[in-house]
Image (cartoon, helix red, strand yellow):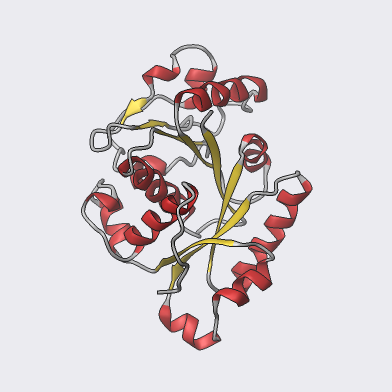
Amino acid sequence: MGELIAVLSGKGGTGKTSVCAGVATALAEDGCSVLCIDCDVGLRNLDISLGLSQSGALSFAEVCEGSYSLRQAFPHPDYPSLAFLTAPVSSYAGPVDEASFGSLLEEAGRTYDYVLLDAPAGIGAGVQLAAQFASRILLVTEANPAAVRDAGRAGELLEQMGKARVRLVINRVSRRLVRAVALNLDDVMDQSGLPLIGVVPEDPRVPICAARDRPLLLSHRRGAAKAFRNIAKRIQGRIVPLSMR
């Protein structure tokens, strides 16, 4: 049975979607079969970070409704073991049926090594739906103290849902900010109350690749690309030292 991983953030603007895409492509690079599902109904963006903005991929709602099968999920042209389901484009598509979504994820878990759910930002119904079915959660935040505090609050809510495997991803880490506030890994874990799984540096290549409709990892090995690969290795149980660098 594959692992279902929800990628969440306590608020918008943390780069959650780029983290989801980066980790998914890194897992596919390592030979894992991966399904990415954009769960952000009406505000979908995962296709851009995956380099699939022109793909015309099916939405997960179309599969849930039985109009199409999971086998018809869009195959990534650069990563043969990576498939993609987008979110419905309209925010008026109606609430997601929990039972049919759960059935989709159950089938996906039998089909793929990893299923990554890019949930909406915040703590609303879409987040809770994605988290409900996830066996592991990546909670994405930024390095500033206010964002870390918000991540800690989101972690408390996830704990109330009975979610124990919640790991923090500190995204867009600026060396200048780290020096200015004397932030270190122990501080982050103490303030958020969550263990870390990855630290991603601020990297201008992330938005550049998105603007070019090209996956970051396809052409880069340093910076954020290296951090995403390290997170993917840790997800697979491999030991990779954590660092702010």
Q: Position of residue 23 (x, y in %)?
A: 41, 49
Q: Position of residue 81 (x, y in %)?
A: 32, 32
Residue 9 percent coordinates (x, y): 58, 54
- Farthest residue, direction left: 219
Most extreme residue toward the top is 67
Q: Which quarter of the rendering shows the N terminus?
A: top right
In the rendered image, the residue lying farthest to the right is 160
Q: Where is the C terminus found, in terms of image quarters?
A: bottom left
| Residue at the spot 43% in from the left edge and 83% down from the top edge | 176
Please provide percent x and percent y for residue 3. Answer: 53, 36
Q: Name which residue lies at 65% across and 36% down.
A: 129
Instruction: Name the quadrant containing residue 200.
Output: bottom left
Labels in figure, total: 0
- Residue at image coords 44%, 19%: 70
Q: Is residue 47 above or below residue 167?
A: above
What residue is drawn where x is 51% and y is 23%?
110
Locate residue 174: give its quadrant: bottom left
| 79 or 181: nearer the viewer | 79
